[in-house]
Amino acid sequence: MQADYVVVGAGSAGCTVASRLSETGASVILLEAGPSDWHPMIHIPAGMRSLIRNPLVNWNYTTEPEKGSGERRIEWPRGRTLGGSSSINGMLYVRGAPADFDGWAQMGCRGWSWDDVLPYFRKSEHYVQGGDPEIRGQGGPLKVEDYRTILPLTHRFVEAAQQAGFPFNPDLNGRQREGVGYSQMTRRGRFRGSTAQTYLREARKRPNLRVETEAQGGRLTFEGRRCTGVTFRRGGALTQVRANREVIVAGGTINSPHVLQVSGIGPAAHLQSLGVPVVHDLPGVGANLIDHYVIRVVHRVHGAETVNEIARFPRVLPEIVRFALTGRGALTFGVTTAQVFCDSREGLASPDLQLLFTPGSTHPLKFGQLDEQPGMSCVVCVVKPDSRGTVMAASPEPFDRPAIRPNYLTTRTDELALLAGARHVRRIFAAPALSQHSKGEIQPGPDIESDVDLLAYARRAGNTLYHPVGTCRMGEDPRAVVDSRLRVHGIEGLRVIDASVMPTLTTGNTNAPTIMIAEKGAAMIAADAKA
């Protein structure tokens, strides 16, 4: 089996890269460890809660116990199906702040400033509501739209945030990030708009694109310092695929560094300790893990309808009918219906906090399950954390799981920002528009007020927001893994194109920036092939 390009991983980035490369006429093989995205709950927006632990479509990773998160093992859902995590996520479309990408350029990532990446955001997008034509895209594969159905409680949150001093922002993906506004989603009509259903759906009709599911990438193959292909496992049998031009690793922040390490690319001392022959000593592989660690502020609700009530039988029955007939109603909900981007302190170049509101609440002890009582919740997210962790191979076997150590809340800056965010949320919930519907705070709880108590709550009850990045960091310094054209340093014919190349986290959710990276990466490959 061979092709011009072999793409390892059919997630947000891999589907995008394979689609764009196949447009050039080159032959492409796309490998996906999981199944096709046949599961019906993938496509119904509100069905995501049923996927959060489903081993059919989810890697179900867990972190190692660490002090910063109360010595707990934290569940890290990652998509294991066509579309990857874009098939199981909350569907939020958040580009990040211009300062994020200007910062990448200042760190040595040439060609990655805001002005450089904006054309690829626009190329990928079709914003249904239109927006600023100089900023928003039209005609791209990824359809982005405002929520079709919004519960009144979300409007009250937006009003309350303004009462608390946060300005209204009509488009959180427009020219400004600061302020409170309504969330935007990736959709395909009434259904989820994963990259499998937007980019790959039409691309699969091309005879030069071959998609292999249930094909878990194993070790890369080399001739000297040139990568020539990869092996994959299906049903216990190993198959080798040859790339005549390049291999593109697009496994994501966990799987991409793991593939490199078990193939002999990574920190030499660690590889030798596992008995992996060293192909290239690249110390940064698996380092620089960054994730969004969050806490929730939750209130009981009265006098307003919440997701908790709507999702319960028999109340959900008319919503099923409404979704089937009109494509509207509660089944179109993702997770977060409104957001605030704001500062934890004065003097910042761009917001360092994201506050995400949901007109519902989840059970404090049952991961991903809605609470039995009506509630409303707001997540506090430090979007630019300083804490850094690692993803490291735990054995030489390519199909064993790596050790994930996110190293949450290990800097005072991260702690102070989280505390500031919690107090911002409490001010919003205390504002007249929202307080009229509150029966009181239940998480963290009214007795938890001091910095010490709030941080203790964060360590015992905080969680991931599912945005890990950075483990194959882009840059030109000795600890960078890929260069500014996403080529692995020291190896020919090998690139990494996914969220793992981000030098820093972006301001908000990471799916949109990951797709942008894939768009730009595919364009670079096509340009280099012509050079």
Image (cartoon, helix red, strand yellow):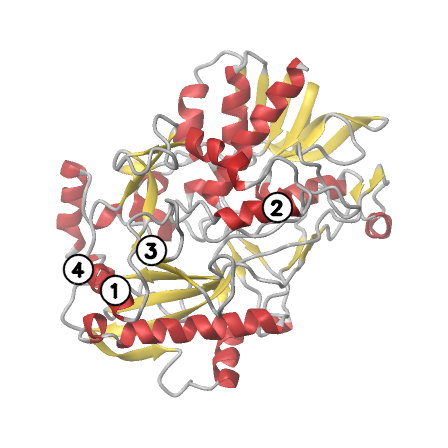
Residue with the mark numbered 4: 152
**Nearest the eye: 347 or 398:** 347
The amino acid beneath tag 2 is: Trp
Identify which residue is drawn at 30% across, 38% down: 131
What residue is shown with label 2? 104
| Residue on which disc 3 sits | 336
Q: Name the residue: 54% across, 59% down.
A: 384
Q: Amino acid at mark 1?
A: Phe
Q: Residues within 10 Å of mark 3 (few under 14, many from 20)?
A: many
Q: Are marks 3 and 2 in contact (CB under 8 Å)?
A: no
For label 1, the residue is 157
- The answer to whether one can see residue 11 in this image is no
Instruction: Measure how far apart labels 1 and 4 are at the Cα level.
Output: 9 Å
Amino acid type assigned to the residue bearing label 3 in the image: Thr
Give the mark nearer the N terminus: 1 vs 2.
Answer: 2
* Residue 179 position by quadrant: bottom left
Residue nearest the observer in this picture, 250 or 238: 250
Element type at marker 1?
A: helix
Is 183 drawn above or below residue 36 in the view shown?
below
How far apart are the alpha carbons under marks 1 and 3?
Answer: 12 Å
Quarter of the image with the N terminus is top right
- For disc 2, the neighbor class at 10 Å (few under 14, some 14 to 19, many from 20) is many
- Mark 2: secondary structure: helix
